[in-house]
Amino acid sequence: MCLRGEYLSFLDISLFSDLHLSSAANYRLRLVPIPVDPMQLILASSSPRRRELLSRAGFVFSVVNPQFCEESSSTPDQSAPERARTLALAKAHSVAANFEDALVLGADTVVALEDRIIGKPRDHQHARRILTALSGSTHQVITALALIFIPSGRTLLEHDTTSLTMAQLGPDQIDHYLCTGPWHR
């Protein structure tokens, strides 16, 4: 993505320090965008899916894998939305620290079942236990996005929650899925 005098509708307009407010008739305010130099968008993620989504949406961006420890960036008592927001922000900050002029996007997704956070599977057996627990139940998928505009230090942090109901899976279906391998990516 390059910002060339254009402003993206999904961004909080306050992120841009070079917008000026001018008064209009009836004391209404209008935003007057001031063109900016092209700005680099950096995706702070190692996720192939996030890369694919941004590419399909038409963004031009660089990818930098965040260097931080997830376990030390969050606490066990956090709710699922708090954890997702904390990790998205930690990813964005870990990458933003290495750049002077860019827009850095960090994201994280957390799955929760009955207010219990379901982590990434550690191994094959753990993946089986997770799938068995999710089978036939409704769980929440929380995705958080952190956007850091480095020159001003402004940050936009949002999350969204989707409830998903998984079909009841039998042992053979779980075995087949586990043998295909995508659970460990």
Image: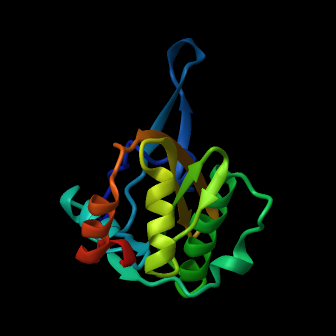
Residue drawn at x 66%, y 53% is 116
In terms of image quadrants, where is residue 10?
top left
Using the image as rendered, state which of residue 160 and residue 169 is in the foreground. 169
Judge left or right: residue 161 versus residue 56: right
In the rendered view, would you say 161 is above or below 177? above
Residue drawn at x 54%, y 33% is 22
Image colouring: rainbow
Residue most extreme to the top: 26
Using the image as rendered, state which of residue 61 and residue 167 is in the foreground. 167
In the rendered view, would you say 166 is above or below 57? above
Residue most extreme to the front: 171
Question: Residue 141 at x, y = what percent?
Answer: 49, 49
Q: Is residue 97 visible?
A: yes
Residue drawn at x 27%, y 67% is 177
Q: Quadrant of the N terminus?
A: bottom left
Q: Is residue 152 visible?
A: no
Question: Residue 73 at x, y = what percent?
Answer: 71, 75
Using the image as rendered, state which of residue 161 and residue 24 is in the foreground. 161
Q: Quadrant of the C terminus?
A: bottom left
Question: Residue 125 at x, y = what percent?
Answer: 48, 76
Residue drawn at x 72%, y 69% is 74
In terms of image quadrants, where is residue 181?
bottom left
Question: Residue 86 at x, y = what percent?
Answer: 67, 63
Judge left or right: residue 16 versus residue 77: left
